[in-house]
Amino acid sequence: MSGGARLTLCATAATFMAACALLPLVDDAIWIVQAAFLLVVQAGVGALTRRVPLARPLTVAVQALVTLLLLTLLFANAQAIGGVLPGPEAFRHFGDLLQAGGADVGRFAIPAPLSDGIRLMLVGGVLVIGLAVDALAVTFRSAAPAGLPLLALYSVAAGLSQASIDWLWFLLAAGGYLLLLLAEGRDRLSQWGRVFGGTARSPGGAVESTADAVAPVRTGRRIGALALGVALVVPLALPALDGGLLGPSGTGTGVGSGGGGTISAVNPLVSLQNSLNQPEDREVMSYRTNSKNTQDLYLRIVSLDEFDGTTWRPAKRSIIDVPSPFPSPRGLGADVRRTEIRTNIAAAGWYAQDWLPLPYPATKVDISGRWRYEPVGRTLVGDHNQTTRGKKYGVESLIVQPTAEQLANAPAAPSELRREFTKVPASLPSIVEKTALRVTEGATNDYQRAVKLQDYFAVSGGFTYNTEVRAGSGSAAIARFLKDKEGFCVHFSFSMAAMARTLGIPARVAVGFTPGSPQADGLMSVGLRDAHAWPELYFEGVGWTRFEPTPNRGTAPEYTRVDTPAGSPSNPAAPSEAPSSEPSAGQPSASDNCPAAERKLGGCSNTAPAVIGASGDDGPPFGTIALIALGVLLVVLVPLLPMLWRQRVREVRLGSPGRTDGDAAARALAAWLEVTDTAWDHGIAPDESQTPRKAAARIVRVGQLDQVAADSVHRVAAAVEQVLYAPRPQPTAGLGDDVRRLAQGLHAKSSRSARLRATLAPRSTVRVAWSLSQRWAALGARWTARKSTLLRRPRRPSGQES
C-alpha cells in the first residue's frame, strides 16, 4: 500500500474512532453507519482527486462538494433538484433541520431521540471533521494539526455524555490519532529511502544486525502508550478533578437522565416507543385509587404541543416551584361536573423517567425530591437529575365529566391560545386538511367535528392497527398514514391532532399510560406495554379534553358516545376484543379479555413491535442511498480507471532509484519501459525487434521532438544499453526527469484530441489485459501439471495388504 493510501485510510479510521464517542448521546446508532459510509466516500473522492492531480485547495473543494451532494441526497432529497443538486429549498430545509436539531439538543436528556435534526448534526459534524482531518493529514501532509479537529469531536462528546465508559471512547480517539501519526511517520521515512532502517556494514565489512530498522516505529509506539497511560492514570491521582479527565462531568440544573437501562429520555414519546419495543411487559408502576371507575384514569406524562413539520414535541416553557394546590385548570367552568379522587402511586425501582406520570388534571401532588412545575401542561419534571426511580407519591386529581351539550355549546377559545395550538407547518400536505374537511362535512360545531374525526379513525375510516409500520411523526408520515391507513397510537393521535388544527380546533398530543390491569389485592398494575398516546382538544368552559381515535386501545370518553347506542359495534367507546398486532400497548384490563396474570406474562399478546424513533420524515432508505452513491461513484470512477492506472504505474516506475547496483539496473529498465509506453500513449506503437538506440531514434523522428526531449530519450536509451551490455553497469542519475521531458515534448507536438486520448484512454493500459491473460495461462498450466501428477500417482493393487 502506498504512503498516500495508508494516510487516507488512517485519517478515515481516526475520524471514525473519534466519532464513536458520540454514540452514547442518542438512543439509535444507525447514524454512525451512515456517517462511516459517507466518510469512506469522502476519503475516496479525496484519494482520486489527489491522483489526477489537482491543486490542494481544489481537492478539498471537490471533497466538500461531493459531501454536500451526499448530505442533500440523505436529508433533503425531496427539496433538491433531481434529488441530489441542492437549491434554495434544500438549503432552507437544512436550516430548518439544524434549528430543530439545536432545539432538540437543548430539550432532550441523554440519550436523546435520533430526530432528523440531531442526525444531520451528527452525520454532518463527523463529515466536516473528517474533511478537516483528511485535508490536514493527507492533502497538506501535516498530521499533527489534524489532532485538533479530532480533539474537538471528542471534547463535544465527553462534555455532553454521562456514560461510565468514557475512558473507552478516549482510548479509541487517542488510538486513532496515534495511528495517523504513525502512518505519517512511516510515509516520511519512506521518502528518505532506507537511511534509518537499511543494512549497515561494520568497518570490517561484516553486515550489522537489522534489528534497529524498526526502531523509530517502536519508539513511536512506546511514546504513544506512555502518553495514553499518563492521560488515563495521572488525572485519577488529582482529587480536584473529581475522577479524572474521563470522569463524569458532574451535575447541573434542569432535567437529568437515568442510568442502568432505564428509560430516561426527556421526550416521553421516546419512552413510549422504547416501552412498546420491550420483549417483556415489565411493571412500570402500581397504584391504588378511590375512583369507582378506572377506565378513564389515564396516567399522563406530558403533552406534545408544538408541531414543526418534523415531529411533535413539547414546547419550550418556563418551569416554577411546585405549587400546592395547583391552579385551577384553564378553561374549566364551574358548571361542569367533576369528581375529586385520590391516587397513591409507586414507581418501580428500575423505572427512571424525568417526567412524573399523573392523572389529568392533577390538583395536588405529595412527593419528595427535587421537582419543578410546568403550568401550561400541568406537569412535574425532575430537577438536578431527579427521576421517578422507586418514588412513591400521592396525587389529588379531577375526573371531569362534561356533557355533549356543554361541549357543543362551547364558545371560541381565547385568541392567544388559538394562535399557539392551531399552528400547522407549511410543509403539511394539503391531503390532511382536505381529508379533515371531507370527514367533518355536515358538522355544525367543533365538538361534532372532533367526534367525527375520532369515529373516522376508530370506526368508519377503514384503518388497521399495525405496529410494524414505521413511526415517523412528520408531515409526510401523516400523509402516508392517511393513504395507507395502517399504524398505531402515534399515527392516530398525531394525525387527529393535526387535522383538528387545520379545522381551527386547538389540539395537542398527550403521552403516558392507559389505566393498566387490576390485581387481586385491589392494586392497579401499569406495564411497559400500557404506554400510549392520545389527542387532547381544547373547549372553552371545559378545558383540555381527551379523545381516543386509536381502535382497540383505551376507551373513548363517555361524552363522545352520544350519537351511538351503547354496545353498538360502531361504538368507539366499546373496546374491541379482536386480536391486535400490538401486545397490550395502552389497553386497560377493563377492556381486555385476557386474564390479568396471563396478560402480565405476555401470554395474550404477540411479540413487542419494532418501533423506530419518531424522527419525522425518514427520507429514502439508507440502502437505496448507498446503492445510488455507489452507482454515482462507479459512473465517475470506471471511465477514469485507465488514467488512474497509468498514473500509478508511472509513479512506481519513476520512484526512488534505490541504493544498490541491482536497484539502479531495475530502475533504468523501468524508465525505458515508461518511455515506450508514453510514446505508445501518443500513437507511437512499440517495436520489440529494435535495439534501444534505434527505438529512441524512431520515437524522436515520429514524435517530431525538439532537441531537449530528443536528448532525454537518447540518455535513457544509453542507460538501458549500459545495463544490458556493460560488464559493470553504473547508475545513471536523472532518468525520471528525462522521461518527464519526453512526455512534455510529445504532449506539445500532439493535437488536442491526441492529448486527451493519451490522458484519459492511454493505449498502454492494454498491458493489464496481457498480464491477466498471462496469469490465467500460468494458472491453467499449473492446474494441468497438478492434475497430471495426480493421475500418474501409482495405486495399490486391490488385493495387496498394507
Image (cartoon, rainbow, N blue to C red):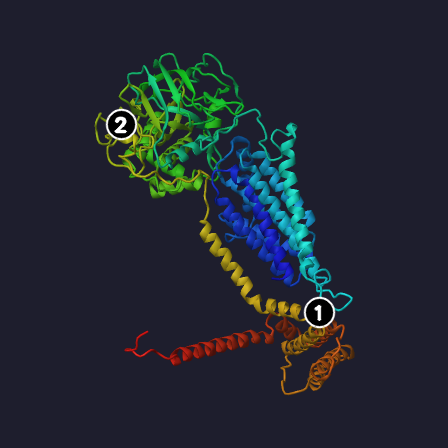
> Is 747 situated above or below 629?
below
Label 2 crowd bin: few (<14), some (14–19), many (20+), radius 10 Å: many
The residue shown at (47%, 16%) is 368
- The circle on residue 95 is none
**Where's the C terminus, which quadrant?**
bottom left
**Residue lying furthest front in this view?**
801
Nearer to us: label 2 or label 1: 1
734 shown above or below 131 = below
Q: Residue at 35% across / 24% down in the picture?
A: 298
Residue 649: quadrant of the picture: bottom right
The reply to whether dot 2 and dot 1 touch (C-beta < 8 Å) is no
**Is disc 1 placed on a helix, strand or loop?**
loop
Image quadrant for the N terminus?
bottom right
- Measured along the vertical axis of the image, is residue 127 above or below residue 757? above
Q: Position of residue 633 (x, y in %)?
A: 53, 59
- Residue 393 locus on image (x, y percent): 41, 17
Which residue matches tag 1? 658
Where 362 falls versus 586 (above or below)? above
Q: Is residue 514 visible?
A: no
**Label 2 amino acid?**
Ala
Front-lying residue, 124 or 89: 124
In the image, is 309 to the left or to the right of 588?
Answer: right
Q: CA distance from mark 2 to mark 1?
A: 83 Å
Q: What amino acid does circle 1 point to?
A: Gly
User: Helix or strand or loop: what does disc 2 sit on?
Assistant: helix
User: What residue does disc 2 label?
Assistant: 596
Please report whichever mark, 2 or 1, sits nearer to the chain's N-terminal start: 2
* Residue under the point 45% across and 16% down: 367
Q: Nearer the viewer, residue 710 or 656?
A: 656
